[in-house]
Image (cartoon, rainbow, N blue to C red):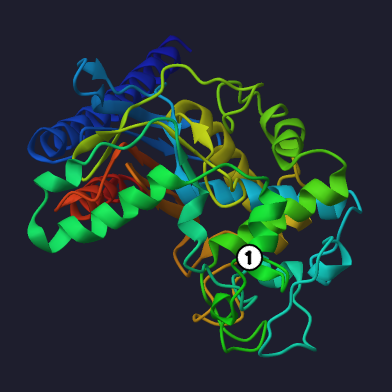
Amino acid sequence: MKNLFLLTIILSTSTSIRAQNVGDSITLKLNKISINSSLVGFAVAIVNKDSIVYAKGFGYANLEAKTPYTINTIQPIASISKTLLGVALMKAQEMGKLNLNDNINDYLPFKIYNPNFPNEKITIQQLANHTSSIIDGDQYDRAYIFKDKIPPFYNNLPDETKQEVKEAVDLFNMNEWMPISDFIENQYSKNGIWYSKENFSNSLPGSTYKYSNMGANIAAYIIDLVSGESYIEFVQKHILDPLQITKSGWPSKNYQPRNVSTLYWYGYPTPEYEQITYGDAGFMTSITDFSKFLITMIQGYNGEDNILKATSYKEMMKDPISSDFRKGIFWSVDLEKIGHSGNDPGVISHAYFLRENGNGIIIFVNTSETENSMSEVRDIYRTLLKHIEQ
């Protein structure tokens, strides 16, 4: 018995040492990327169905103040926000508030249809798998509302980039807040001031994949309408609160985040911004908080009932009908992994788990649109992927 006890201690210690060695190896590699890259700051996590296996921050949340980026640093995560929308839709369907096969015009206070196919209905399901034929028009960038004017940093950029960035900055600096209902109606209802046939594709609804941020926003607005509360309140009540995710949300009077990272766009610090839209992006969180969410999703994919029924997870993360479609219910699904990525001014983000072994990766970066930022983030992803594939 004594020898068995000693053997148990030895095996436990050996496992602990191996885990520490793996963590040290990852840290060493990511430190090297951080030091040699254009990325101001980032944090990463490796998770499985039970817990966080590895999590660490690198670089700075604020370069000017030398504030370290940690696993508790808060930042927007761009389009990964859509994964919350997928869960919210499934919860609303479980509650009998809607059905994914419903016509969106069964709920909207104004009519939306593709003028190229006026008799064809657009369904919530089609919004969710990006086959609705609703596309992001020229007015989509009006959704970004910056708290302060963006300075003319574009004057320091190369000539081939300067004019394009100036036009974006000028638009951002003129944007004005409006309700999400107006933002949608103005683009996609015939009475809207920005309505155009160009806001719809030439494909029959349900037939062709075309990524659509505004499709996501229409879906979130429908949750507003069917739930009797705001989409943000719905997510808080049915997702964040049950998972004890306490420091995340969309900026509002009820959520004023602390420990927020500065965002660096084209290498320059950018004023804080919010978005009129909330279904497609804008969720603010940390590696620590979001890990709780992704762990829960992995458990659900593996057949566990938690904040959703196991059958809802199966529907939400089902294989697309063809490789051309790419999405389940707002979740990217391919043969190897399930999750989402995101990109907004000053933000690059990834959150995926492997279908085979259930190990997941989360990466939040506070820098975008530098010359090498995308390839540098890919290096981070590949570094982590090597360890979760084992």
> Tag 1's secondary structure?
loop
Specify few, some or many for label 1: CA neighbours under 10 Å numbering under 14, 14-19, or 20 or more: few
- Residue 177: where, in percent of width, then height? 58, 42
- Across and down, in percent, residue 67 comes to 25, 16
Question: Which quadrant holds residue 53?
Answer: top left
Q: Is residue 348 left or right of residue 182?
A: left
Q: Amino acid at mark 1?
A: Ile
Q: Nearer the viewer, residue 277 or 342?
A: 277
Give how far across and how far down residue 237 sits, in percent: 76, 31
| Residue in the foreground of this view, choosing between 261 and 332 | 261
Residue at (33, 54) in percent of width and height: 168
Q: Write the residue at 80% across / 71% down.
A: 111
- Report the residue at 80% width, 89% height from top: 119
Please state the horizontal and vertical placement of residue 93, each as a whole percent of the image. 83, 55
Side of 23 relative to 45 (left or right): left
Q: Which residue is mark 1?
A: 193
Residue at position x 24%, y 45% from top? 380
Q: Note whether 389 is above or below 243 in the view shown.
A: below
Q: In the orientation shown, which residue stands out farthest toward the top? A: 2
